[in-house]
Image: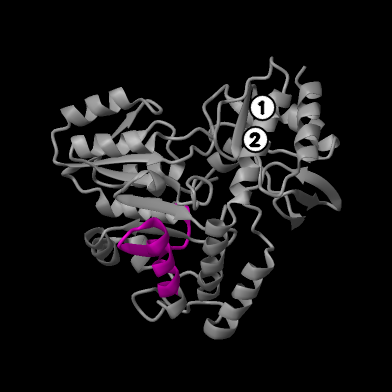
């Protein structure tokens, strides 16, 4: 029989405690989730600012449906580029102080599509070792040569750049790293890029809305050449954008296959996202709440529990064994806490972890309860 590897590899996943299954969610927000009729405190949400279900966003979404319809009905270069898309792109440009913006269907699509388009044979990409799978896939699928430097190791990055035989060099990093929750030193990366005559690409999927006085992410530290960020996390809608200069914009419109040959995102979603951005800019209390609750969690955990230092919504507690991590998650679920186990290949072998995400909707009592349960289960 052909394709025997399908059943074999699924069986291997089960043996290694790496088997994955979906869970059907009947209700959810930044604080709680309902699964199979049971309500849990939710510490696995990307709704960082707690904007999902916000009445103003919902109202704008309905307005968008009424004005522009639920579907773009074509790719952006045919008849799919609506006024709602243009308005959202303008909003992003003003927010991040960038000349141009392009909307993509997802962050994975944006990262993969842009890097494949930019990665010619006379180019070299320099990726942080902990870069997201979409960045790695996009880089490796391109014609560019690829070097991966040790996580946040600027000395090694500079050495690689100095030895590069090509003129077209692109540094690639995440603003906040999705599995550890730590941050890139964006100011340092900007300086290195300028000194080494390289371009800088920042994936702000987890830092847009969170970092900066108005939630501008990496752009709050200075001029980044290319910024990618998603709408489906802190901004509570869907899709993604690339913010860049005029030349990169024109190039992507003409050569990014993921952009050219995809139906544009829903114009109703685009219209609603304008409201999301305005709320993210204006309501800084949401960011303040995340940082205050994050600090509380670190003080409430027992000293023997190792949590990776973080200044974001993401807090990683590394357990190691896949089996042990799953057992802990089940114990927490029994106590009414929804906290998903993160296992290889998402993270390195023997580094399975609890990935706690704190949102603006969480309360002090939620953090205290989580810490008490973790202290009990991990003692």
* Left or right: 185, with 366 as reference point: left
Residue 293 quadrant: top right
152 above or below 73? above
Mark 1 = which residue? 298
The magenta region covers: 85-107
SS label for mark 2: helix
Q: Position of residue 241 (x, y in %)?
A: 42, 59
- Is 374 colored magenta in this rendering? no
Q: Is residue 120 above or below residue 54?
A: above
Residue 356 lies, in percent from the top left, at 66, 36
User: Which image quarter is the N terminus in?
Assistant: top right
Q: Are marks 1 and 2 in contact (CB under 8 Å)?
A: yes
334 or 366: nearer the viewer: 366
The answer, for residue 70, to whether it is visible in the render is: yes
Disc 2 target residue: 294
What whole-number distance in Å separates the C-alpha atoms at marks 1 and 2? 7 Å
- Please indicate whether residue 314 sits to the left or right of residue 255 in the image: right
Decide if residue 220 is on the left or right side of residue 171: right
Q: Camera-side residue: 152 or 300? A: 300
Q: Nearer the viewer, residue 354 or 122?
A: 354
């Amino acid at each position: 029989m052909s394709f025997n590897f399908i059943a074999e590899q699924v069986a291997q996943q089960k043996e290694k405690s790496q088997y994955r299954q979906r869970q059907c969610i009947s209700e959810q927000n930044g604080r709680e989730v309902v699964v199979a009729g049971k309500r849990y405190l939710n510490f696995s949400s990307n709704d960082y600012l707690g904007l999902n279900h916000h009445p103003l966003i919902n109202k704008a979404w309905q307005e968008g449906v009424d004005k522009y319809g639920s579907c773009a009905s074509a790719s952006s270069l045919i008849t799919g580029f609506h006024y709602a898309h243009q308005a959202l792109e303008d909003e992003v440009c003003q927010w991040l102080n960038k000349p141009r913006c392009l909307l993509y269907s997802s962050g994975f699509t944006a990262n993969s599509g842009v890097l494949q388009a930019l990665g010619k044979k006379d180019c070299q990409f320099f990726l942080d070792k902990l870069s997201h799978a979409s960045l790695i896939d996009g880089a490796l699928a391109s014609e560019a040569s690829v070097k991966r430097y040790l996580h946040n190791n600027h000395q090694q990055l500079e050495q690689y750049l100095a030895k590069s035989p090509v003129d077209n060099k692109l540094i690639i990093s995440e603003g906040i790293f999705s599995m550890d929750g730590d941050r890139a030193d964006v100011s340092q990366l900007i300086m290195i890029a300028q000194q080494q005559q390289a371009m800088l690409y920042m994936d702000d999927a987890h830092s847009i809305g969170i970092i900066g006085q108005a939630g501008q992410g990496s752009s709050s530290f200075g001029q980044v050449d290319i910024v990618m960020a998603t709408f489906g996390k802190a901004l509570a809608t869907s899709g993604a954008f690339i913010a860049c200069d005029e030349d990169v914009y024109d190039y992507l419109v003409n050569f990014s296959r993921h952009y050219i040959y995809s139906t544009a995102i829903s114009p109703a979603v685009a219209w609603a996202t304008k409201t999301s951005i305005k709320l993210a800019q204006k309501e800084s209390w949401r960011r303040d709440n995340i940082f205050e609750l994050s600090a509380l969690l670190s003080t409430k955990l027992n000293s023997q529990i190792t949590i990776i230092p973080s200044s974001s919504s993401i807090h990683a507690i590394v357990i190691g064994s896949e089996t042990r991590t799953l057992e802990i998650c089940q114990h927490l679920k029994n106590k009414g806490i929804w906290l998903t186990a993160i296992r290889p290949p998402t993270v390195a072998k023997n580094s399975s972890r609890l990935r706690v995400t704190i949102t603006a909707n969480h309360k002090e009592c939620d953090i205290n309860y989580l810490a008490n349960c973790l202290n009990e289960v991990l003692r």
